[in-house]
Image (cartoon, grey):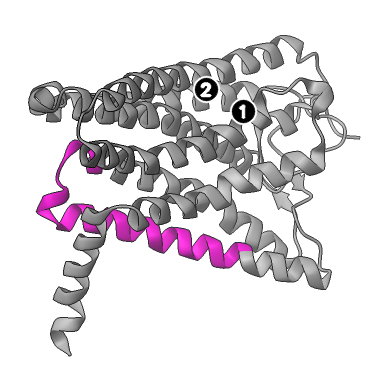
């Protein structure tokens, strides 16, 4: 019989997202392709922003941090899921489980605040263009970035530590493809009511505070754009903001659907699919959204290709 206090010796079991049916093998192959595309796309975005002097602005610095968070997010989840699937194993150690919870919450929470910082950057650029270099200086940009990482890290550390402190004396089967705090807490053989309430409050704060800042920024942007007399200026402002709004909609839509619904509306199957969307699919969409709709990024990519590849032909 397993000791109720033994939370370090015995591994947890991840039931995963796929079985070995032909359809699931195909879906697994698609996930691997998306994972590799996400890594390459985000790495290329960071490289272009670092290499091209024209992209050395606060907006693109924040975008490079978003790409870094996305790369780390998919790397903390997909390789373990793929290894378990290919090797026919399902186990994950308590330390590995804690690391996944910490990284997921750190990166997810950090991304929430980073998107708010990006919205503020667009607000200053459109509503106060002449004062932009002063209001959005390098020091403030670094502080906002560091604050995003720090707030996410504190949330991740608290929730990962608290989750692993519970005794797990019965089933250790997690019906998920990675260790997510709510899925793990359901298995604890202790009263977790207070922690679940605390976790819910944390999620609301980590989601709604940045989202409120984003909505406030874009309300002011919309008011300023509607007052513009030039149609060309209006189109440029909308084009600048549309990419960011698309990313915000995708990221927040799936997170709110997962974390802010009443418990009675939760379905394990639906939760796994939605989790796959914001942990695997959203990170690959971000560089695509920003590159396809952004002339500066496309120009930087063209120059980089000409310098490193076309120039040698």
Are the residues flagged by discs 1 and 2 in contact, CB closer than 8 Å? yes
Q: Earlier in the sequence, mark 1 or mark 2?
A: 2
Q: Quadrant of the C terminus?
A: bottom left
**Coordinates of residue 247 in the picture (x, y in percent):** 45, 41
**Coordinates of residue 245 in the picture (x, y in percent):** 42, 36
Camera-nearest residue between 110 and 266 = 266
Residue carrying label 1: 256
Give the vertical position of 229 relative to 240 (above or below). above
Q: Residue furthest bottom?
A: 313
Q: Residue at x 29, y 52 (%)?
A: 294
* 58 drawn magenta: yes
Callout 1: SS: helix
Query: Magenta span covers which residues?
Result: 31-60
Camera-nearest residue between 99 and 136 = 136
Q: Residue at x 45, y 17 (%)?
A: 212
Crowding at dot 1, Cα within 10 Å, few <14 / some 14-19 / many 20+, comes out as some
Q: Residue furthest top?
A: 194
**Coordinates of residue 70 in the picture (x, y in percent):** 44, 47
Q: Residue at x 13, y 27 (%)?
A: 132
Left or right, 7 with reference to 213: right
Q: Quadrant of the N terminus?
A: top right
Residue carrying label 2: 207
Q: Can residue 174 be seen?
A: no
């Amino acid at each position: 019989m397993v000791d109720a206090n033994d939370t370090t010796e015995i591994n947890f079991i991840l039931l995963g997202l796929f079985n070995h049916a032909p359809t699931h093998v195909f879906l697994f192959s698609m996930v691997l392709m998306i994972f590799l595309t996400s890594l390459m796309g985000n790495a290329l975005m960071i490289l272009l922003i670092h290499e091209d002097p024209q992209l050395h602005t606060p907006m693109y610095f924040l975008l490079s941090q978003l790409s870094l968070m996305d790369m780390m997010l998919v790397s903390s989840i997909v390789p373990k899921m793929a290894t378990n699937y290919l090797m026919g194993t399902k186990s994950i150690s308590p330390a590995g489980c804690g690391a996944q919870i910490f990284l997921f919450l750190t990166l997810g929470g950090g991304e929430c605040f980073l998107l708010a910082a990006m919205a503020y950057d667009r607000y200053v650029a459109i509503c106060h263009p002449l004062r932009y270099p002063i209001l959005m200086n390098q020091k403030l940009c670094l502080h906002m970035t560091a604050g995003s990482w720090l707030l996410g890290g504190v949330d991740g550390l608290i929730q990962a530590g608290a989750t692993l402190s519970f005794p797990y004396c019965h089933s250790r089967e997690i019906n998920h493809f990675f260790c997510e705090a709510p899925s793990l807490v359901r298995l604890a053989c202790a009263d977790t009511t207070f922690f679940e309430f605390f976790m819910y409050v944390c999620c609301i704060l980590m989601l709604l505070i940045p989202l409120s800042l984003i909505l406030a920024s874009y309300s002011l942007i919309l008011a300023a754009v509607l007052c513009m007399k030039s149609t060309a200026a209006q189109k440029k402002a909308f084009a600048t903001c549309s990419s960011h709004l698309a990313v915000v909609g995708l990221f927040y839509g799936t997170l709110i659907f997962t974390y802010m619904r009443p418990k009675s509306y939760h379905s394990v199957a639906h939760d796994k699919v939605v989790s796959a969307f914001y942990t695997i699919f959203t990170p690959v969409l971000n560089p695509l959204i920003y590159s396809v709709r952004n002339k500066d990024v496309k120009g930087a990519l063209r120059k980089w290709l000409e310098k490193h590849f076309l120039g040698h032909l």
